[in-house]
Image: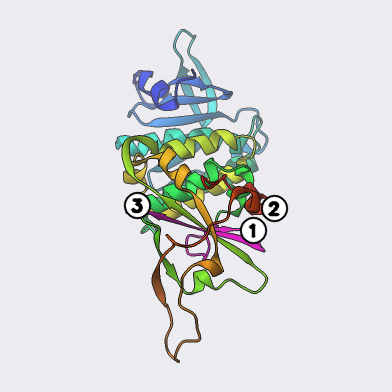
Amino acid sequence: MTPSLEELFAELATPGGPGIYSAVPIPAASSYRLARAFEGYPTLLIDVAEIPGATSLVDLRGQHIIVHHGRRCEVRAPDAVPFVGTFSLICCVSDEAALQGYFLDFLYTLVRMLGERPTAEIISESMNHLLELFAALRQSPTTTAQGAWTELLLIAEAQNPAAMAAAWHTSPTETYDFNAGAQRIEAKSSSRGIRRHHFTFDQLTPPEGVELLIASVLVERTGGGASIRDLLQRIRTTLAANPGLLQHVEATLAQTLGSALLDAFDQSYDRELALDSLRFYRFDEVPRLTGPFPPGVSGVAFTSDLSSTTCLDSERMLSRGGLFMSAPRTGAS
């Protein structure tokens, strides 16, 4: 079993001084090196000696991230002769274990975004994305850990994870969680054992010609379940060949949970219970208020109990094709 980057980083010795890095090649991406800086910080080394235009790259500093380009460094690897090379250094400047762990987890996505032979332009674009990702960790969360876990579950367990990931909202303020044009899915979860969910009037009033389904999941916190981190790692593996979609998933999760992400990362829920309880409902079958409302009334919200509402079975989901065919199969017969 391939060790995680967190495990590899823990084994790296602290180097003897500034400009010296203890490093090992990243598994499945050996042209990149995972390193420990003199200060103890986790660092990604990109060899830029042979990359045209690399000398024009600009150093960057962001939230917990420093990027230096064109630095001459001594690299010391276990059981190898030390050598000096010219690198771009991407360093997570934090002593917080959770933040370092998030950075190390994200490095696999980052090296896939960079590719085997990155250009100066790709390096620049990837570094800007990295800084935006960590900047999002300062924002206020727009959903709960339970809500984010439910949405990630629908992607990780989808029949077509790429299609579900592509439909995942680009902004956490969008009306629907998954939008594929004429087909949309709004994900709802309940930890009370009852399909009682909160809706806004707008969520159950889709545009003309749009087919909307409500995904309802019952969730339960458990120490031995699947965490947000587990689901994200599964999605990273599944979408490894599609770095653009990976970037979208990473950004959406960071923007959605914001400052709550690190605390929520290892919260675990019962995956089997959630999948067995998954049901899809037509939006117009959901008990709801209907307009028009009196002048001056807006932002109408309510709670609906779907316990007596008829759900769609898997065959009816498949018959609709597109996004609905890509979604996970339900526990309904």
Q: Residue at x 48, y 39 (%)?
A: 232
* Mark 3 Cα shell of 10 Å, populated few (<14), some (14-19), many (≥20): few
Three-letter code for the amino acid on which mark 3 is drawn: Gly
* Mark 3 or 2, nearer chain start: 3
Three-letter code for the amino acid on which mark 2 is drawn: Ser
Out of 230 and 5, give the one closest to the viewer.
Answer: 230
Label drawn at residue 180: 1
Reading the image, the residue beneath label 2 is 319
Q: How far, Cα to Cα, is label 2 from label 1? A: 16 Å
Secondary structure beneath dot 3 equals loop
In this picture, residue 31 sits left or right of residue 138: right
Q: How far, Cα to Cα, is label 3 from label 1? A: 30 Å
Secondary structure beneath dot 2 equals helix
Reading the image, the residue beneath label 3 is 193
Is residue 184 shown in magenta? Answer: yes
Is residue 7 shown in magenta? Answer: no
